[in-house]
Amino acid sequence: MVDKLNGREIKICCATFYESDIVRMFLGDVLHPGGLALTCHLGEVMGLSARNRVLDVACGRGASAVHLAQHFGCHVTGLDYSQDNIAAAEEHATAQGVSQLTIFSNGDAERLPFDDSAFDSVISECSFCTFPDKVAAAAEMARVLAPGGILGLTDMTVNGTLPEDIQPLLSWVACVAGAGTPEQYIETLEQAGFIDFTVEDCNAALLEMVNDVRRKLLGIELAAGLGKLDLGDINLTKGKHLAKRAVELIESGVVGYTLIAARRN
Amino acid sequence: MSSDAEWYLNSLKYNKPGSIPHDFATAVEDGCPFDCGLCPEHQQHTCVGLIEITTRCNLACPTCFANAGPGYDLSVAQVEAMLDRFIETEGQPEVLQISGGEPTIHPQLLDILAAAKKRDIRHLVLNTNGLRLAQDPDFVRELSVYRPFIYLQFDGVSAQTYENLRGQDLCGIKKMALDHVAEAGLHAGLVATIVRGVNENEIGEILRYGLEHPSVLGVCYQPVTFAGRCLNHHDPLHRVTLPQVLHDLENQTEGLFMVKDFRPVPCPHPTCSASTYAYVDDKQVMPLTRLLDVDDYLDFVTNRVLVDASAVIKPVLEALWSMAAVMGSEKTTNNLTCVACNLNLNLPSSVESLVEHFFSVHVHGFMDAHNFDLKRLMKCCIHQLLPDGRAVPFCAYNTLGYREQVRQEQEALVGR
């Protein structure tokens, strides 16, 4: 799958996947496992406060950036590959009254459009795994962080190869095909100059996210069965199968979710 | 022990590995079932924790497996320590059942409910024979502050049944208790002890009664446990089995609920329980098994559901609602015409009222000395919580002398 797509295609494909309405319908506005509660926890692990200048790499529609600004009072710059997401993020920040604490801009995680040492904190949620060139992305995050600055990631981990039958979820597979083990992420980050690692297992948050999708599928089936919802030509079989396989992969430890925090040397 | 080989063999396929509690209270010394506490060989955590806050009772049922009657009350401090231990072993406990004896005659019941409510426990259930609920509507109103789910002993609809099983006709008492529960805005499940030759012919009528009473969200049938006083009155070899209840239900309701509508509950040993859910409104009773392939979602059904379907249904409806909120104006989802979201309902209250349309039917076969099965015991997730911090599987507690041991210890403590 990955061989057939070049890096740029993967980035567009992932951004498009996360932008699509059907994905938003099932995942809601917060698109990463653990939701804003885990975002907040990540901020606490990093020791964020109102003094910090934070960069959110692959900020999506700005849910985390806005939440961090509200919760910690810090200044947050959000960067995303999709122009539509940037527009939505700006709108969200204004609606939430934190437009003065947030800036959103369009750009590529592998060539961050910021000066060296421009930030003292960098976060990236459920995104590092999607960056085709992780060495470049890690080096860029290190470059824009001032020495002693803190990096906080939460991300998908994959241990081994993903089975064939989940391939139908093409874009998602393209994203997580780039996921590695926590050890691999740490190694890449160490090479980029990060030290003092904190690692937390967040598999339960990932499982909860998948089960939330399954509850929605059940709700839809139920409402359709009772004649309260017209499904039209939408077929839920494939979605149900994928969700079920996802649970099995998480429970068997093939797919997981991990929090990693580290300090820029 | 089963009366339906097909049901039994099929149910084994539903076994699912359990999850382990955060802490064990005992070590493996004499081997199962003599080290209960739980010991590290136990295969499932506590889905339902029971606390018998009193051994006293205002009835003297000939069928009582707990030998309740005169006895002692646990202090609020004792119960609080047990609750803290429950949190220690479970993290966020799922269900707490306050039981007895008859818990409503404990003088500090409300303090105990408040203590439970203060802690992070998802569902609070009060087991009762309904006597005090019928006689004291003010008490039911006081109870309603703590929103317990009322798990009401309800064995049938005839005077003879109650006279045989409970020593007196309680038909009027049960009705009045349920009316008071409804007036206080609480919900109840009917819990029927089924004894062969006494009330198995009322299985269908119990269901109909439940469907018609506004406070009732489900029925739970429990073939009688041959322990305690029950052994003086009934023959343990003359028993009702779990599949028999299902067949009786199908026959006595003209197929409103059929055997094939039921699935084993995968969280304890799958031969212990069977359950189903139905959507109920004025016009219809529709078991969900006839609307969708419930096997796809069975892992959402754990013992926490007891007779209250809301534990399963509510998160599903909330998920659906949260999706409806996003769905509204989206172009790709235009062909999903959601009746609920077009109505622009007030979210929490509409989920609440929809939940009341789901009715659950549950059968749980407990074990006694005559049908004891260690495989079932090791997977048990209904545990008696003890004052000394142990948690003992319900059937072991009733059958193997644990109950008598605890009673002796506690009576020594209060100086009897």
Image (tube, rainbow, N blue to C red):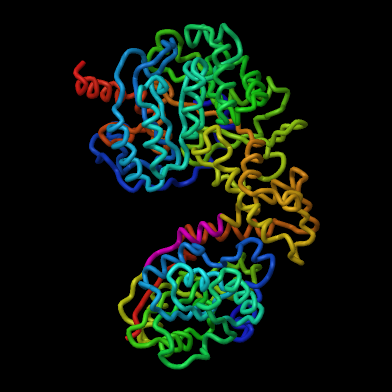
Seen from the viewer's position, the closer of residues B347 and B102 is: B347
Residue B206 seen = yes
- Spot occupied by residue A49 in the image (x, y as percentages of width and height): 38, 73
Numbered range of the magenta stretch: A200-211
- Quadrant including the C terminus of chain B: top left
Residue located 51% across and 61% down the image: A249
Count of numbered badges drawn on the protein: 0
Q: Please tell me whether residue B142 is drawn above or below residue B13 in the rendered image.
A: above
Q: Position of residue B176 (x, y in %)?
A: 57, 16
Q: Residue A262: horizontal and vertical position, in percent? A: 35, 77
Residue B191 in picture, x, y percent from top left: 53, 24
Predominant secondary structure in magenta?
Answer: helix
Residue drawn where x is 48% and y is 57% of the image: A251
Residue A223 covered by magenta stretch = no
Position above or below: B263 against B345: above
Q: Residue at x 61, y 47 (%)?
A: B348
Q: Is residue B403 left or right of residue A15?
A: left
Q: Report the residue at 36% width, 24% height from top.
A: B398
- Give the answer, above or below, for where A150 lies relative to B271: below
From this view, report whether residue B299 is shown above or below residue A10: above
Judged left or right of residue B352, residue B67 is: left
Q: Is residue A14 visible?
A: no
Reply yes or no: does residue A203 show up in magenta.
yes
The image quarter in which residue A186 lies: bottom left
Query: Which of the 4 image quarters holds residue B352?
Result: top right
Q: Quadrant of residue B399?
A: top left
